[in-house]
Image (tube, rainbow, N blue to C red):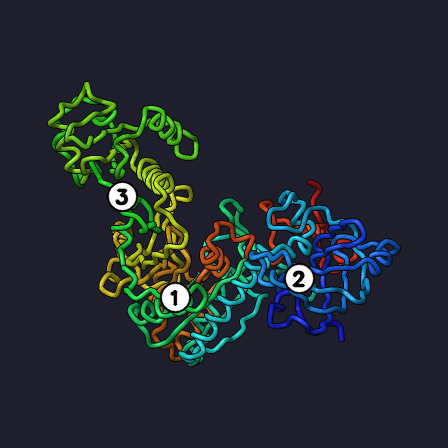
Amino acid sequence: MYRTHTCGELSMQHVGTTVTMAGWVQTIRKFGSITFTDLRDRYGITQLYFNEMLNARLDKTPLGREFILQVKGKVVERSNKNPKLTTGDIEIEVTDFTIMNSAATPPFTIEDDTDGGDELRMKYRYLDLRRPVLRKNLELRYKVNRSVRNYLDTLGFWDIETPFLIKSTPEGARDFVVPSRMNQGQFYALPQSPQTFKQLLMVSGYDRYYQVVKCFRDEDLRADRQPEFTQIDCEMSFVEQEDILNTFEGLFKHVFKDVKGVDIKEEFPRMTFDDAMWNYGNDKPDIRFEMKISNVKALNKVYCDVLNSVDFKVFSDAETIVAISVPGASEYTRKQIDELVEWVKRPQIGMSGIVNVKCNADGTYKSSVDKFFTEEQLKSLAGFCNAKPGDLILILAGAETRTRKAMSELRLEMGNRLGLRNPDNYKPLWVIDFPLFEYDEEDDRWVARHHPFTSPKPEQIALMDDRSRYGEIKANAYDIVLNGTEIGGGSIRIFQRDLQEKMFAALGMDKEEANEKFGFLMGAFEYGAPPHGGIAFGFDRLCALLGGQETIRDFIAFPKNNAGRDVMLDAPSAIDDKQMTELNLQAKDA
Ligand code: ASP
């Protein structure tokens, strides 16, 4: 038997027992003729004590970091207890040991606070995974997975696998393609999601489907994305939007409780897309804090009289003026404000400055544009921005889209600076009533905001006959947002052939192309397709959020780097000539 106990389970109650343990040597501390060693495995760390006699053996066959060591010994109470370790009350008085395998010196320290850089750790990912932080992340991932499966199982969902070698599914990204040897000159696409398959399963009558499944999207990898990522993918039949929201709100509550011990009793708020954009500047609002955006002047929708009467070019020339009232920040120093101005001037934000109004606690106002505004005007501006004494109003002015986006970022930044974005404070919400279409300026055409299988609001279907009104049509589509991050989205689907055809036509696909690409789905709709809808959650991102971290990479056992490379395998890489010939492929000279 290799071991009687793991390295994470022994405590005072085991004192006196004889045990056999095996694991990795974490540290070796030699004090004269005795040695202490920490032995590590997935379960924890246990201290070993080697007496003088064994030390003589150790001198002949020394231990090294990460050696695989098996020891026999007795559990004894430690004189010098370590309250940080679960096994910190005891140690093992070793009576015999075997070095089961030696190890080269690891290229970085296997500790949470490691000295290894990102690339190095990715190259030796199997060593990096030994670090307790990563082990905890993967444990959390496993627990979330198990929790999701248990919940869906109780509701009668079936886990059904769908193929990876398929034909393109349009989810808005480029496909990864796989050449076919048996059908030369032809390619499979890897699924961007199992979208069409889960819909076909509904046509087959399977009613409730889910899968924890890999999806592949060949996108630029900015913003912490991975070319292959995992979704919790779900679909249900005979449901309306309300049924989906309730079912999956239940799922989230279950997972929060099960994995984090957090009991969310209230219903998740629901916010329309328009309200989210208007009040928070984006469609994934972080509602852990208020600081809503005031639309001081926005495309003729609201116009503040005060601004109208003041001759201040920065405002009068601006398409949009938006403001936030930062609570308790009226005492910001000149330096702090200058810092914020520099912050919005960075190219990622792209503004030329901030106008600020300090609403002093004594009821007076002080502004960076005092010479244009009277105290009375500042007061009514403050009223318009819902500012209270003690607040600092930050105002951005400029072109609509850029200014709104910048304000949304500035709001989040102020949330960070004020410590209002505690990762342990979970504030989920549903964003609903998304637009069906989005105008793609670059390609000069309408595209599906979610995907082309999403159903318009039934009462707006008629608008699909009038291209000039596409922008008004709302979809039966919804996202779930947690702490400013979209963690899932879905829709009620089109399930009639004629409406699906109309949708493809609206997206600029002629009948022939639609048939060639999606004939299988539209064909299926002719054989008794039930009304259906679904949702998919970004599993990696959900785990990262539940782990209180931002990068998904640390929650994936073997991730790719920012260039989409697996640096451990050195992939992607060229394939040999024989494979190229078999596939009838030829690489162009770069
Ligand atoms: N397939 C969609 C996605 O990957 C999710 C859904 O509509 O269910 O975003």
Residue nearest the observer in this picture, 73 or 287 = 73
Q: Which residue is at the far right? A: 60
Give the label, 2 or 3, closer to the camera.
2
Instruction: Say which residue appears at 32% left-offset and 58% top-offset.
Output: 429
Q: How many marks?
A: 3
With 50 as the anchor, is 337 left or right in this view?
Answer: left
Vertical side of 479 occupied by 377: above or below: above
Q: Which of the 4 quarters of the picture holds residue 43?
A: bottom right
Q: Which of the 4 quarters of the picture holds residue 26?
A: bottom right
Residue 87: x percent and y percent? 61, 63
With 516 as the anchor, is 387 left or right in this view?
Answer: left
The residue at which mark 3 appears reads as 291
Q: Residues within 10 Å of mark 3 (few under 14, many from 20)?
A: many
Residue 167: x percent and y percent? 54, 63
Q: Which of the 4 quarters of the picture holds residue 269?
A: bottom left
Residue 428: x percent and y percent? 34, 58
Q: Which mark is residue 136?
A: none
Q: Earlier in the sequence, mark 1 or mark 2?
A: 2
What's the residue type where badge 2 is placed? Thr
